[in-house]
Amino acid sequence: MNLSNVSFNLDQPPGIAIDDTGNRFDADGNVFAGPLSGEKLNKVDQFMGFWFALAAFYPDIQLMN
C-alpha cells in the first residue's frame, strides 16, 4: 500500500489514526474503514532500546534534545 503522500491524524476509538483520504487504521495497521478497507500498512523494521544501554556501547555519544 503506497501512502507516501498521505497525512495521518489521531482518530477516535476504535481507530488509532485516520488519513486524509478517509481510511481509518487500528493499532496493528489494518484499514477497517475507508476506500482501502481490508488493506494493511507495511511493517517497518525497528528497535527499542534504552539510552543507558546505548551509552554503554558508545561511551562518547552525545545526547541532544
Image: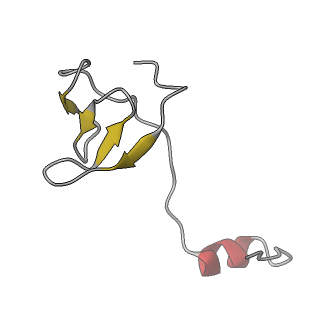
Q: Residue at x 40, y 35 (%)?
A: 43
In the rendered image, residue 9, in percent from the top left (x then y), is placed at: 39, 47
44 to 61, vertically: above or below: above
Assign the C terminus to one quadrant of the image.
bottom right
Describe residue 31's horizontal placement relative to residue 43 as left or right: left
Describe residue 54's horizontal placement relative to residue 2 as left or right: right
57 to 34, vertically: above or below: below
In the rendered image, residue 58, in percent from the top left (x then y), is placed at: 78, 71
Q: Residue at x 71, y 77 (%)?
A: 55
> How many numbered marks does the figure carry?
0
44 to 58, vertically: above or below: above
In the rendered image, residue 37, in percent from the top left (x then y), is placed at: 19, 22
In the rendered image, residue 12, in percent from the top left (x then y), is placed at: 20, 54
64 and 14: which is toward the camera: 14
62 and 2: which is toward the camera: 2
35 and 43: which is toward the camera: 35
Q: How is the image coloured?
A: secondary structure
Q: Residue at x 77, y 77 (%)?
A: 63
Assign the N terminus to one quadrant of the image.
top left
54 to 16, vertically: above or below: below
Q: Residue at x 49, y 61 (%)?
A: 48
Describe residue 48's horizontal placement relative to residue 30 as left or right: right
